[in-house]
Amino acid sequence: MREERWNELADIKDELAARDWFPGTSGNLSMKVSEDPITFLVTASGKDKTKRTANDFLLVDLEGKPVETTILKPSAETLLHTEVYQRTDAGCSLHVHTLDNNLISDLYGDKGSVIFRNQELIKAFNIWEEDGEIVLPIVPNYADIPTLAKAVGEVITPDIKGVLIRNHGITVWGRNGFEAKKHLEAFEFLCSFHLRQLTLKSI
């Protein structure tokens, strides 16, 4: 099970890295390995995510602490993932920094959320209404990680599939790696489309 999850998460990392979604070693990924107790693989701190190595991930508990002796350190933002696993049925959580999701977070940060409407990609979130919409909350970018993780946790509800941190990327999740990646791709498309739409309207 663990090796299978490791390889699946590594494949996702490779695919996202090919899209340049990990600038400057930013971003972190995780995948649940066990339910009782909850343990999950998370990216090791400070690694070049464009490379694939045997030290890319380590196993941590629901407090974000390694469950085995290791020289690796969990990502500084591991607590974001613990909030997701405590509050949802997620099996995978992905956090990336892209230009478009950062711009959207800054444009709508004062409002506390951005709402996407009337886009086909909303169906990626199992929303099939003709006039469907999805809300993407935006929380402040607190420097203190426990405070930031708490802020993320406080906006998670059953209808929420991702959270933007202002000028600090997006965290999304899904029941498995496939669904989490689908949600990430859909949100990135929606952010990019919205920015392009705003640009065209200003011409």
Image: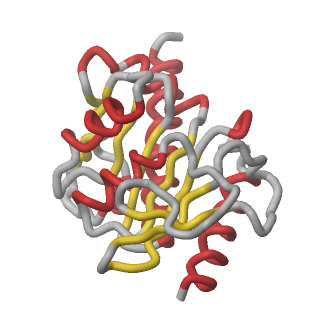
Q: Residue at x 70, y 57 (%)?
A: 71
Q: Residue at x 72, y 52 (%)?
A: 17
In this rendering, the answer to whether 76 lies above or below 12 is above
Q: Name, please, the residue furthest toward the front.
A: 69
The residue lying toward the viewer, choosing from 190 and 22, is 22
Give the image's coloring scheme: secondary structure
Lateral position of residue 106 relative to residue 74, left or right: left
Lateral position of residue 78 relative to residue 136, left or right: right
Residue 122 spot, x, y in % from top left: 34, 54
Lateral position of residue 186 relative to residue 151, left or right: right
Q: Name, please, the residue furthest toward the bottom.
A: 1
Q: Residue at x 60, y 69 (%)?
A: 9
In this rendering, the answer to whether 20 lies above or below 106 is below
Residue 139 spot, x, y in % from top left: 31, 28
Q: Quadrant of residue 38?
A: bottom left
In this rendering, the answer to whether 79 lies above or below 29 is above
Residue 124 spot, x, y in % from top left: 38, 62
Residue 78 spot, x, y in % from top left: 47, 49
Q: Name, please, the residue furthest toward the top.
A: 203
Number of dots carrying numbers: 0
Q: Residue at x 57, y 47 (%)?
A: 75
Lateral position of residue 172 relative to residue 169, left or right: left
